[in-house]
Structure formats: structure tokens, C-alpha cells
Image (cartoon, rainbow, N blue to C red):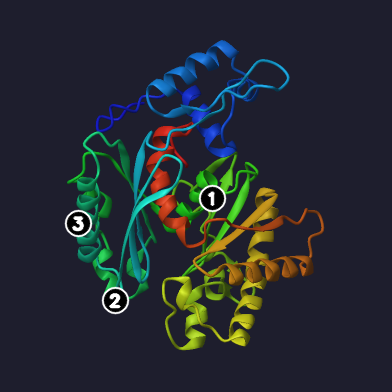
Amino acid sequence: MPNDLTPWIDLSWNERQILSLVRRRGPLPRAALAQTTGLSPQAITNLTRNLIRNGFLDAGAVVRGKVGQPSTPLSLAPDGAQFLGLKIGRRLVELALVDFVGRVKIHRQEIYGHPTPDRVLTFARNGIATILGSLPPDARIAGLGVATPFRLWDWGSEMAGWHGFDLAGRLAEDLPFPVFLENDASTACAAELIFGRSALPRDFVHLYVAHFAGGGVVLDGRLRVGPRRNAGALGSMPIPGGRQLLDCASVSTLEARLGRSLPPDDSGWQVPPDTEGRWIAEAGDALAFVALSAVALLDIPVVVIDGAIPRPTRAALVEATRAAMARLPAAGIDRPEIIEGSLARSARILGAAALPLAHFFEPGGALT
């Protein structure tokens, strides 16, 4: 369905399906698209011609010399559409322009003591104006996605200004394209689904370790957030000892033990190995309990663990979770495969940009 603010986007379900397949599997010839979708070769030819004509697909060089007719691989056109993503974190706000293939073209950020509505709104407005001013007049911006923790006012009295503040509405007042807002842990999951590993199954759980741990659930290839947007809120899941996952598997827990804050980038991650090791072991136990609980409820085959942490720390956390999973009783169910995510600190900002992408270009019209 076309949007009044984006009249250049008017794609059928089949066209969205083609774009989604190419996005996840890489360049594909028309024969492969026909075989995968079940559409006739003539229908695929007509649909892909339309997508090429409208600037969403590029045709590569003809491949010859193989069995059968020569084939032309089709890939996403990088400038077919562009998306803005805004990510609000505990100490960092980010804004990015992301192209149609998921590459960050422009990135801005600001570090603060804590986010306030006025500061975030000013940063976003100024940054968006600067980015739009640097683009050619015919640049095709599909929308702005916002990734933010929900209930920011629960973080402390200094965050009270967020109660009742309509950030998406305030941003939309000034923009010629739509604005979408979702929980930041859900957008991290969305980023893995849209831009991450191509071999993921259609059902998986995503656990994201940041200042507070969170998560997301993908079923039948779509992110699910539930009618009250609590689905996949794995950071809030109870664990043994009368605690929640976020009490053990959050960076804030490690910071409390260190007695200082860790910087919002990998370069300043300096943690004594014994302190980090104890945190990883305890977090792994909690993550395994939550992962196996999710499997018992939803029969999920894969659990992805990612986070705003250095890659060696993430790898150690995955290993600790696997070891803890092996120790848990699992009679009657199959233990899931535990794998590393692929996007690390970029997951939430890419997931924010994925919100308008999914709305206009994914089959079904939305992630949720």
C-alpha cells in the first residue's frame, strides 16, 4: 500500500517477496526466484523488470558457460531506498542513514550523562536536517525508525520527563516521511532478521546484552512483539533466585561490580579478567535458563546471542551459555543451538532503520 508521504513506493506482495529473497540470499537469477516463489517464469520476468525499472533491483553481468540458458543475477540496488535510524541508549544517542542493502552511509552520535527528551529531540532534528541537506534532491528516503527502551522513566527520577512524551509524534511534525518507533531490544532482533545471518531459521530467539539485557522472538520469519508489546521482553523473564535476566546478564551489573561506567564503544572496554569471567559465568547461567524456557514454550531451534560488548566477550558469553545449557535438565525437549549474533553494537541502529524498510518492502508490510 503506498503511503501519502512516500508515493514512489507502491509494491505488490510478490514484488516484496522477491526483494526479501534477494536481500537474504544474495544475487539470484530469475530461475531461482521462480523456483523458490512458485511463480511462473513469465510472472517473475514481469515483476523483476518492474523492480529494475523502478530502481529497486540491479541486473548483473550475464553468466554463461553453465548447463542451461545463460542467467542474469539480480541484486538489490543500493540507492533503491534509504532509511534513517535513531537509537536512544543509556549514555549514547545515534543517528544513521542506511542504504537499501544495509550499509551505514552517514553516522552521527552524542554521548551524555543520561538522555532527556529535549536533548534527544534537538540532536535528532539537527542531525536529520544535516543529513537531508547533504543528499541530492531526488534521494529516496522511506522513513525514520526509532529504537528506544520502553518506560525510560523507570530508570530514575532524572528520566521523569519521558513519561507521556511522544517522541515519534514530535519528530514526525517536521518530516516529509513516516516515523516508526519500537523497543530497542526488538529492533536489535529485527536487524539480525533483516541484515544479519542469511542462514537463520524462520523461528529463533534473540538475546541482546547491553546496559540492560533484552530480547526478541521471531516466528515464521517475522518479529513478534505481542498486543501489549511485551513478547520477547526476555530481560524481564524471572530466573532462579527471585531475580530477572537483566539482573545478571546486563552490562550495568558488570559496571556495578567495577564501580564505574564502561564507555559506549569497544576501545575503552577494560575489565579485569577475573571480574569479567565471573560476570560471564553468571550471565551464561541466566541466559541458558531463559533460552531453554523459551524453547520449552515455543519450540525454537536456535538462540542468537549478541550485544553491545566486544566480540571476545560475546564469544565467551556464548560458550558459557552453551556449557550452562548442557547442565540444565531438558527431558522432553530438544536443546537449541546457541550461536553468536553478527551485528554487535550496530544492531539497534540498523534495527531502527529496518522498521521503515520492513513496513514498505517486506511481505506482510511490517516486522511485527
Displayed quadrant of residue 234: bottom right
Q: Name the residue under label 1.
A: 192
Work out how far the residue at label 1 is from the one at label 2, CA to CA, in angstroms.
33 Å
Q: Which of marks 3 and 2 is nearer the N terminus?
A: 3
Q: Which amino acid does label 3 sit on?
A: Asn
Do residues under tags 3 and 1 come within 8 Å of each other at their CB atoms?
no
Q: What element carries label 1?
A: helix
Left or right side of 187 for 207: right
Figure check: 207 above or below 113: above
Q: Residue 300, image x and y in percent?
A: 67, 49
Q: What element carries label 3?
A: helix
x 41%, y 71%: residue: 264
Q: Which of marks 3 and 2 is in front?
A: 3
Q: Earlier in the sequence, mark 3 or mark 1?
A: 3
> Dot 3: few (<14), some (14–19), or many (≥20) neighbours within 10 Å?
few
Q: Which of 307 and 328 is in front in this view?
A: 307
Q: Nearer the viewer, mark 1 or mark 2?
A: 1
Left or right side of 202 for 346: left
Q: Which of marks 3 and 1 is in front?
A: 3
Q: Residue 128, image x and y in percent?
A: 24, 51
Left or right side of 190 for 126: left
Q: Which amino acid does label 2 sit on?
A: Ser
Judge whether residue 123 can be spotted in this image.
yes
Do residues under tags 1 and 2 come within 8 Å of each other at their CB atoms?
no
Q: Residue 338, image x and y in percent?
A: 69, 58
Displayed quadrant of residue 116: bottom left
Q: Which of marks 1 and 2 is nearer the N terminus?
A: 2
Q: Mark 3 points at which residue?
A: 126
Figure check: 170 above or below 237: above
